[in-house]
Amino acid sequence: MRQKYSIYRNVGKKILRIREYAVLDKDLKKIPSDELRQDHFSFLCEETYESEHIVSSISRGIGDLIQTLRTRNIFPISPYAGKIAESVIELYRNSENCSVELFFNDVDLVSIG
């Protein structure tokens, strides 16, 4: 499955928002990942976290941050969770509103493992 996570930090509202998307249409399997458009992704879910809680988790280490970011709705597999957590740490090094999009393709995991 090809998934995308949009991660946005809003400094003024003191929140972090993660949105998860995936390519669900089987007809799109043959389209190369670099040719996918925004409308090929289906919205799956969204989680909003209080920045205070995220900062506290970051201070306790990446394992704690991963545990905080994983919820009943968003529960990425370990390799993805680690990359998401690393991206969140980078966002919190910035003092302004900022965002990042992460793209994952399960095929890449098969070729690695």
Image (spheres, grey):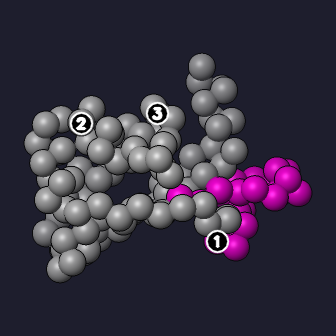
| 54 over 99 or under it: above or below | above
Give whichever of discs 3 and 2 has the lower sequence position. Answer: 2
Looking at the image, do the residues carrying marks 1 and 3 touch, with CB atoms under 8 Å apart?
A: no
According to the image, label 2 marks what residue? 64
Q: Secondary structure at mark 2?
A: helix
> Which of the 4 quarters of the picture holds residue 24?
bottom right
Q: Secondary structure at mark 3?
A: helix
- Please say whether residue 34 is one of the residues in the magenta stretch: yes
Residue 29: x and y in percent read: 82, 50
Neighbor class of circle 2 (other Cα within 10 Å; few <14, some 14-19, many 20+) is: some
Residue 3: x and y in percent read: 60, 52
Image side of residue 49 versus residue 14, left or right? right
Residue plotted at (66% across, 26% down)? 110
* Mark number displayed over residue 101: none
* Mark number displayed over residue 38: 1
> Which of the 4 quarters of the picture holds residue 65?
top left
According to the image, label 3 marks what residue? 79
Residue range corresponding to the magenta coloring: 20-40
Q: Which is nearer the eye, 82 or 45? A: 45
Looking at the image, do the residues carrying marks 3 and 2 touch, with CB atoms under 8 Å apart?
A: no
Residue plotted at (72% across, 62% down)? 35
